Amino acid sequence: MYRLAGRLAPWFGGLCLLSLALGLYLGLVVAPADYEQGDSYRIIYIHVPAAWMSMFVYVVMATSSAIFLIWRLKIADVVAEASAPIGAAFTAVALLTGSFWGKPMWGTWWIWDARLTSELLLLFLYLGYMALRGALDTPQGSARAAAILAVVGVVNIPIIHFSVEWWNTLHQPATISKLDKPSMHISMLRPLLLMVLAFQMLYFHNLMVRLRTLILTRESRASWVAELNPETGN
Amino acid sequence: MAEFLNMGGYAFYVWTSYFLALILLGGVALWTSMQSRKVRLSAIRKAQQRRRKS
């Protein structure tokens, strides 16, 4: 697992930079301005990928936490622990960029509507998870407690996703849906998908690097660690 | 170029958003790689010292 993560990391990193460069160029330079929102809509190219990733990373975290609780698979716990910081960062980016989009379009930085409130709750779930990992004296105890929090918190994910349909919110409904034709022109859609790919690759790259760090920390007494090169880690 | 930077009058909102994303996501990436380097150096060195002693 340690070696596999090391081999995959540069590929994810390279793909991330490639799609990031192309996505930013197409989104900021090539795509036309929106007929209603002008150039302010360009915030979408970081807001939507960050919001999507905030939920995706949480689902990964909750799923691997469940696997850890049921089958006691240690690597699943490592995946969950490694995912939390980048997931929290995606959530913070989604909230902040949403605020900077809401101000010019809605006239307010923040309102307590269902979408915004449930996304804020997601940030607190991430922060609570990270705090809990260090809170108990025994590593096994805090791993189990944090895993339970992650699994219970997953109820928030459908709430975030469907909040714009269940309640009347100020937040606009989804732009891209798997079932319908996207309500967006291809010149605006292509950079958005590229940015989603870039953020996805950023997560995978970050996950691989953090997995290696966590495995090294946990297995520092294993004999194979002594055979690695300290400069490269391989 | 000036027109591009102006973002149709929304420069403040658009560029602040991109800047915040860069700081937060770049920050996590940077922290991750610094932590990875630190752990790599100390964990592997310690393991090798233990091996030499035994």
Image (cartoon, coloured by chain):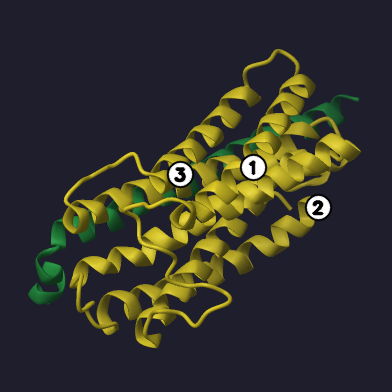
Chain colours: A yellow, B green
Q: Residues within 10 Å of mark 1 (few under 14, many from 20)?
A: some
Note whether A214 is above or below A18 in the view shown.
above
Which residue is under mark 1? A154
| Mark 3 chain | A
Q: Nearer the viewer, residue A229 or A63?
A: A63
Q: Is residue B45 visible?
A: no
| Mark 2 chain | A
Q: Is residue A2 visible?
A: yes
Query: Going 57% across and 74% down the picture, which residue do you hit?
Result: A178
Which residue is under mark 2? A1
Percent from the top left, x then y, of residue A81? 66, 38
Q: Amino acid at mark 3?
A: Glu
Percent from the top left, x then y, of residue B5? 14, 69
Q: Nearer the viewer, residue B43 or B49?
A: B43
Percent from the top left, x then y, of residue A206? 58, 52
Note whether B49 is above or below A111 in the view shown.
above
Query: Going 68% across and 15% down the picture, which residue do you hit?
Result: A136
The local secondary structure at tag 2 comes to loop
Query: Going 43% across and 50% down the picture, which residue do you hit?
Result: A167
The local secondary structure at tag 1 comes to loop
Do callouts 1 and 2 mark residues in contact (Cβ within 8 Å)?
no
Of the image marks 3 and 1, the number of the one nearer the N terminus? 3
Query: Going 8% across and 73% down the picture, which residue do you hit?
Result: B2
- Please indicate whether residue A84 sits to the left or right of residue B2 in the image: right
| Mark 1 chain | A
Which residue is under mark 3? A119
How far is the residue under mark 3 from the one under mark 2? 33 Å
Q: Amino acid at mark 2?
A: Met
